[in-house]
Image: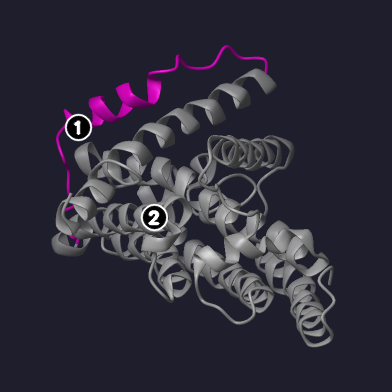
Amino acid sequence: MSNELQILFWILVFPGFVFTCGVGLLSSWVVRKVSALVQYRVGPPVLQPVWDIRKLLAKEILIPEQANRFLFVAAPLVALASVLVLSTVLGVAAFWPGRAFVGDLIVVLYLMSLPSLALILGSSASASPHAAVGTAREIKLVLAYELPLVLAIIVAIIKTGGSLSIADAAAAAPVASISGALACIVSLLCIHAKLGFVPFDMAEAETELGSGVLMEYSGALLAMWNLTSAMMLVALPMFLVVVFLGGFGSTPGQIALGIVKYVVILVLMILIKNTNPRVRIDQAMKFFWVYCGIALAGAVVLAMLGSVYGIGWL
């Protein structure tokens, strides 16, 4: 297979669109089903996420009269495209480390931030007062969790000896050290906020803002946002598995272990989602900047000491 066809296969089939969408929709069903069981409800059938997307695709797209039409329509397209590229880059680094490129860790960090920025732009373009409140919250939330996430990635880079390669991070498995474990835990909380799960769902807050940032979206545009969220439910935990937990490997046993790691992360997010009430935006900012920031600053210091003195468990 030529390089062009290989890249096209990666993007469209595996580990790109088809694979990420399928696993993402299944994972979103698992989250909804387990959450329903915790609340003593039956929950949706397994194909409900697919039916929801299909229903939205058949509905009319309504654009507010005062909205910036270009930004309003382009935002979900940018978000979906960025998650698609993110899942492809992570998947190639996880399953074909020899085909990964140098510096892919920086590219992944950039791609992870694009969906949130696209959501901010799209919501701002809707000219809705409810969406404006959600946008303000989303901006503050992004500013809150991005700093700890960057510090966590710095810990992973230090543990790899300064390499910016995801494959090198997977080989180093930073979670086996104190600093790496701290970075992994804080990164889990950061991607939980990036997914907009409770207790960090204040930007949507259906009971307060009527979906907030997504209030004016409908039809196929809303379907794109839902599909983006489902794909992020695969890409972001995969980021944790690859960068902090040793990756997936190449043998069937290693791949099975990698799947177990992904399931464990998904279970932890479901537990956090169903055992915590929504927090205020100021509480979220204090949590990420103060508590997570201090913890990650200490983790960076420990990682540097471990690197200088050759103490792997630091």
Q: Position of residue 217 (x, y in %)?
A: 28, 45
Image point (14%, 35%), residue name:
60
Q: Quadrant of residue 210?
A: top left
Residue type at mark 1: give it. Answer: Leu
- Which quadrant is home to the C terminus? bottom right
Q: Is residue 136 left or right of residue 41?
A: left
User: Quadrant location of residue 242?
Assistant: bottom right
Amino acid on which disc 2 is placed: Val
Q: Is residue 195 visible?
A: no
Closest to the camera, between mark 1 and mark 2, is: 2
Residue at (69, 67) in percent of width and height:
288
- Exactly how many numbered labels are in the figure? 2
Relative vertical location of residue 94 with respect to residue 21 in this rendering, above or below: below
Q: Main secondary structure of the magenta part?
A: loop
Residue that mark 1 sits on: 57
Front in this rendered view, residue 132 or 238: 238
Q: Residue furthest bottom?
A: 308
User: What range is drawn magenta here?
Assistant: 39-67
Q: Which residue is mark 2?
A: 92
What colouring does the structure picture have? Answer: one colour
Q: Secondary structure at mark 1?
A: helix
Relative depth, front residue between 116 and 22:
22
- What is the x, y in percent for residue 181? 76, 60
